Amino acid sequence: MLTLVGANKLLHKLPAYSFSGGRIFITKCGALDVNTPANNRNLIEKIRERITNDKVEISPSAYDTAWVAMVPATEYYSGLGGGNGDRPFFPKCLDWIMENQNSDGSWGLDPDHPFLVKDRLSCTLACVLALTKWGVGQRLVQNGMDFIASNGWAAANNNDQFSPVGFDIIFPWMVNYAKELDLTLPSTLTSHVVDSSLHVQDSDIRRKQNVQVYAMEGLGKACNWKGVISEHQKSNGSLFNSPATTAAALIHCRDDKCFEYLISVLNANCSGWVPTIYPMNIYARLCVVDTLEKLGINRYFEFELRNILDEIYG
């Protein structure tokens, strides 16, 4: 069984971690010791067994779960009862957020990792927005705000922080949305940090159209969501296999296939959370190939890796 921990959308590389599609996946894989051939043989067989096992475990994405939690229950979706927009369509996602805050007030992957503060800042603000939108979890919101106040410096730090893809587009949008919800943000996010991010946001939208693919959530009402759905919707109903981007589309326009995609994602784990990418099999298997090549041990698994690539690209 392969164990993958799906973090929020990260751009920069972590040592010995593998990447696919601009997102990060931490693959648990031991290193081979050339001085202990017997142990190596055992480890090779264990890795080979995991490669050939199609089952993949992935971790929750607090960021994506928050976006799905913000989708309102409206008359948009004809497959279920709908509502008037005053309650969440996916209340289990809201429950998961309320039950999974880190002890320091943040949400997100590995609260002790010094290089993931920026990622957790993004996850935390998204979760705070979801809770505030539906008027629940005031204590959790305050804890999250305290974390943001203490760590807002990371929003403008590009030197020693792994940055989520599209952060300079998405994060300013979330800050502006917080203001729409009458949420008083810490001063660290209403000063030059946000001004700088907004400047980069405008530049990215004007000069780097390809970035929008990874940052659609940050375009808000300025995005032609119907056009995006028409052009980019996959056969499974998603936009880019991203729960967050698909949820953002649903916040702004009706599409039954988008709803059905998110329902299928939640039905896959029945725990109220969503991963950063779904379905995961193709990404996970390419991640394995990439990791073994980076570790320099792919020669031990040439047959298995060739089969993976043949199945995907053949």
Image (cartoon, rainbow, N blue to C red):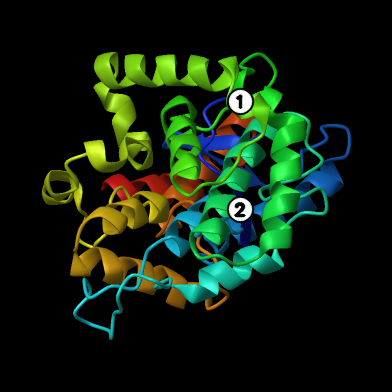
Measure the C-alpha gap from mark 2 to mark 1. 26 Å
Q: Is residue 289 left or right of residue 139?
A: left
Q: Is residue 132 above or below residue 73?
A: above
The x, y position of residue 254, in whole percent, is 19, 63
How many discs appear? 2
Q: Residue at x 55, y 65 (%)?
A: 135
Within 10 Å of the Cα at label 1, are there few (<14), some (14-19), or many (20+) other Cα atoms?
A: many
Pointers 2 and 1 in contact (C-beta within 8 Å): no
**Mark nearer the viewer, 2 or 1:** 1
Q: Look at mark 2 in the image and give the residue it sits on.
A: 4
Work out whether mark 2 precedes mark 1 in sequence or the reverse, and give the earlier one: 2
Q: Amino acid at mark 2?
A: Leu
Q: Amino acid at mark 1?
A: Ala
Q: Is residue 20 visible?
A: yes
The x, y position of residue 232, in whole percent, is 19, 46
Q: Is residue 302 visible?
A: no
Secondary structure beneath dot 1 equals helix
Task: Name the image quarter holding residue 141.
Answer: bottom right
Q: Residue at x 82, y 32 (%)?
A: 34
Badge number at residue 155: 1
Secondary structure beneath dot 2 equals strand
Residue situated in front as seen by the camera: 160 or 88: 88
Please identify the residue farthest to the right as the structure is shown.
35
Q: Is residue 10 above or below residue 198?
A: below
